Each structure stands twice: as C-alpha cells, then as structure tokens.
Image: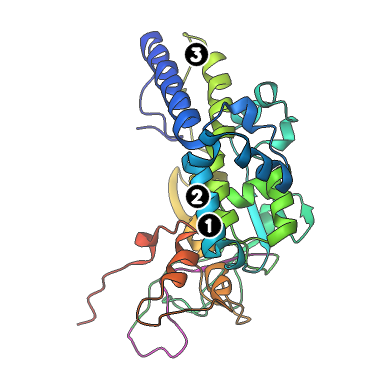
Amino acid sequence: MVPGGVTAAPSSGELLQCRYLLKRFKDWYEQRILGCSLERWFQVKSVSDLDNWLEEKKSHRDGELGFYIRFARRIGLDKIGQGHGNFISFGLFESIRCAAATTGKAANDLGAAGFAQGDLIMDLNPENITEHVSHSWFYDQPGGQHPFDSATRPYATGQESQKYSWAKAPRYNNLPAETGPLSEAIISGDPLVKSLMQSDGPSVMLRELARLIRSAELIAGMELCLMRTPEDAVFYEPPGPIPDGRGFGLLDATRGGLSHWVTIEDEKIKRYQIITPTAWNASPRDSDGTRGPCEEALIGTKVQDLSNPVEVGHVIRSFDACLFCTVHVMDLS
C-alpha cells in the first residue's frame, strides 16, 4: 500500500471490469432504491416535487427510498433530531465533482467544501479547526488546540468528574458542526435538501434521506471518472526526498469530513493527528460546555417507553456513528 490509498495500478481489463460492476450497481440502485432512472430522480428538487414523485408510480412508492419516506413520516422521524444546525464538509474528489456534465449541475454543486451555519454558507478554512479535551479522557490542554498543536495523551482513572468520552471535541470557529451526507448536500446547495430543510429542519428523516440519495450523485461522478481514466495512467510516483514541514489532507469519507495532520522532521513523522467524522458528530462537550451534534440532537426527544427508548436509537443511528474509534481498553493496575 502507498500513501493515497492506491494498492495497485489497475490493468485495462480491471478498469473494464470496474465499469461493468458500476453499471450493475447503477441498474440495481435505479430498480430497487429509486424505482426510477437517475435522470428522473434529478428532476425532484422540492418538497412538492417529492410528493408528486411518490404518487407518480407504484415503483416510486414501493422502492426502498419511497418506502423509507412514507415510513419516516408516519412514525415522526421528520420531527426529531434537529441538532445545532451547523454543518461542515471537506469536499469530494475533483473527478467526482466534475460529474456536472452528467447530472446537469454546476461543478460547485457536487461535493463542495465549506461550513454552514443556518442559511449562511462559508468557505472552509482549515485554520479554524480545533480540538477540545475538557470532557474527554485525555490529559488537559487549554481551550481548543489546532490539530497541528494538539496532543493525544490518554488519561483516565475513573475519578474524573466531567470527563466521559474517548472522543475529542472538534470545533470549527469554536462551534460544533455535524458532518456527513446531509452536510455535503446542504453545503453543495442541493435544492431538494434545501427545500426539506426549510420545511422540517435537519431531522432524522432528512439525515438518512441524504445518505440514501448520495449514491445517485456519486454514481454519475464515478462513471465520468472511469470514462476519463486512460489505460496507461500513472497511479503512483515515488515522492523522492521528504522535506521537513507540515501537511494535511481533508476529504469527505463515507461518514463525512475526515482529516489527517502530520508534522515531518528528518524524514520521520514527529506528530500525527486524525479527526474522524464520528469525532465531529459524537463529540462530547467542549471547554465552553457546549454539547456535540449527537448530544444536541437528543435534546427534546420524546421517549414513549423508557425501557425501550427506540427514539433515542433513531436519532443516534441517523448520524451513522462508527464508535470503534471511541472504545479503548486500558490497564490501570
């Protein structure tokens, strides 16, 4: 494996096979998830369009997407899980964003990077990202520290009064921010998501809906990416001497914004920090006592049966949390 995630240089046959597999997935997605073609789905741009689409054909109503929308509305998932209303996206690969020619959207409307606070969408500035540990099981540090300066030193005796999580608390401009497919859609200006946001806010239903329809955008981008990949493309070049310095990489992964921050001295890694999407979404309180996105989304949730709080499960699962990165085992003997 080499940096960047490329494990092998694909042959022409493997590229052809990849196109074939993507075509099969696209056919399955249109038939089973959407119940219509991608072209028809891209015409759905508002709440009224969505309602009309649902009633247009039986295949729309009975597809996985149609069933989910009807089910979510019936049990009230469109009314819970609001959260702070702050969103962050690091953007997608440029080749994916260039799918505008396929979807009819502007290039900036696919996988754009940015920070959204309510209706205000701002350009992303990595300098504004910090990590807090006041409520995390790490040695304390003052306020929020930039990832280049932050340390990861576990500290937990079980006696700390306010520490309760192995996740740090990432913040942008000292604000908690949700990340994931919903954030991507909001910052990219998806008209359907914008219309649903105006109607019901960032609900559990909308968060999961954005995840379901994300593939529609990505399929088009992947098709274009594969079509433009020449058979003799160079997939890896040795970097040569590695200079001292700092570097970072920001990209939206499956669950949202993922970032790596590295400091190099004498061709060796001196410091390395990773901020995962789940760290953003499932972060604990920060130095100001502000709750993370998952915590805030739970506030006000009505639970019908305390012995079986399914509503809590709906809210937390809508963030698609990967909690392995917040589970640790320590020998305190």
Looking at this view, is 34 or 208 the one in front?
34
- Observer-side mark, 3 or 2, equals 2
Neighbours of disc 1 within 10 Å: few (<14), some (14-19), many (20+): some
Q: Quadrant of the C terminus?
A: bottom left
| Mark sitting earlier along the chain (3/1) | 1
In the rendered structure, find residue 72 and report the number of the disc placed on it: 1
Taking the magenta stretch, the answer to whether it contains residue 59 is no
Where does residue 298 sit, x and y in percent of width and height? 54, 74
The secondary structure that most of the magenta stretch takes on is: loop
Residue 281 can be seen, yes or no: yes
Neighbours of disc 2 within 10 Å: few (<14), some (14-19), many (20+): some
Where does residue 173 sit, x and y in percent of width and height? 70, 65
Res 291 quadrant in image: bottom right
Q: Which residues fall within the magenta stretch?
A: 157-172
**Residue contact at pointers 1 and 2, CB within 8 angstroms:** yes
**Residue contact at pointers 3 and 2, CB within 8 angstroms:** no
Residue at x 73%, y 46% (from the top left corner): 48
Residue 124 can be seen, yes or no: no
Residue at x 73%, y 35% (from the top left corner): 108
Q: Is residue 321 left or right of residue 176?
A: left
Where does residue 174 sit, x and y in percent of width and height? 67, 69
Instruction: Please give the residue where the numbered disc 2 appears in the rendered image.
Output: 68
Q: Is residue 104 left or right of residue 160?
A: right
Q: Could you tell me the amino acid type at mark 3?
A: Ala
